[in-house]
Amino acid sequence: MLALTLTGLKLRNPLMLAAGIMGTTGGSLKRVAEGGAGAVVTKSIGKEPRRGHSNPSMIEVDSGYLNAMGLPNPSYRDFQGEIERAREAGVPVIASIFGGSTEEFLEIAGALRADAFELNLSCPHACGYGAEIGTRPDLVEEIARAVKSTARSPVWVKLTPNVTDIKSIGLAAQRGGADAVVAINTVRGMAIDIESGYPILGNRFGGLSGRAIKPVAIRCVYDLYEALDIPVIGVGGISDWRDAIEFIMAGARAVEIGSAVGNNINIFSDISSCMREFLVEKEWTLNDIYGMAHEL
Ligand code: SIN
């Protein structure tokens, strides 16, 4: 009842692990998949190993988390084994990748084997990467086109909400041949310690995730659904089954869950069984509710 095909990938349900949470090792990705996720997305992987920003790199704030991890990762050269281990769980494994140039994206996508690539063009706090590229439609189109022309797997582009018009970035990804867009990455934010007067995060500013950003993400998904022909994957503040339903009604084909996995690793099976019950009670299918909020 919840199964679907997304950019050619067969998913048992529309609930995926978002990049950045439990995605650094094959063992943790496998654990999440065994906990009921329809697919899992790795931590963002780049060309060279990175230590990331100095601590504190993640703090809890009202209704969410602020992070400035700084894209720590072991490099794609040391990551294929983790993907293979995650694959043992039998669900699609999507590699989140980042680069500072088209060439870097091409190098990584050409070397890694994954069921799909999610291009991180949206991290809000890494100099030369992520949103510094992903706020420019010309570069988004160029990178999507280049990766699509060589990748053997579907290409998804993860978008930043920190722009005036997310539709123009989504359209650029679509023009470049992306198979789907993922909306949204974190919202730029910061917190200050009033005892010292200093910013709390080691990087001073970071990205807000969790419940606080859900309405922002819903609006972005709603707008992208209207503007694009390719599927929109929703992410941002999903904490329970009602949130997942809301995203699908806004126009998400599938959703990713991040921050809330920290409180409940079995959130995927919990959400999918409640979604199933809800759909049965309403006598709706997943297709019936897809984009339902646009029908009025
Ligand atoms: C990070 O590792 O810095 C977070 C990634 C992101 O915000 O895209």
Image (tube, grey):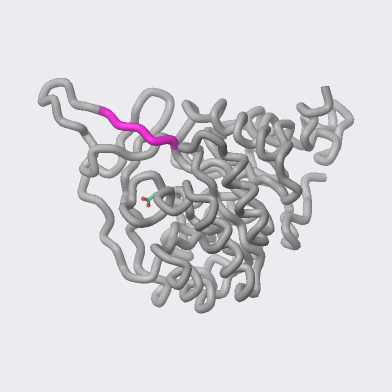
Quick check: can you spot residue 267? no
Q: Tell how many labels.
A: 0
> Residue visible at 85% across and 26% down?
282
Q: Is residue 85 above or below residue 292?
A: below
Quick check: can you spot residue 153? yes
Q: Nearer the viewer, residue 233 or 78?
A: 233
> Residue visible at 50% across and 59% down?
96
> Residue visible at 70% across and 32% down?
250
Report x, y in % for residue 128.
34, 56
Report x, y in % for residue 92.
64, 62
Q: Is residue 48 above or below residue 172?
A: below
In which image quadrant can residue 200 be found?
top left
User: Is residue 188 in the magenta section?
Assistant: yes
> Residue visible at 39% across and 44% down?
124
Q: Is residue 115 left or right of residue 213?
A: right
Q: Nearer the viewer, residue 258 or 127?
A: 127
User: Is residue 225 in the magenta section?
Assistant: no
The residues colored magenta run 187-191
In which image quadrant can residue 71 be found?
bottom left
Q: Which is the main secondary structure of the residues drawn in magenta?
A: strand
Q: Is residue 280 left or right of residue 248?
A: right
> Which image quadrant: the N terminus?
top right
Q: Is residue 269 above or below residue 29?
A: above
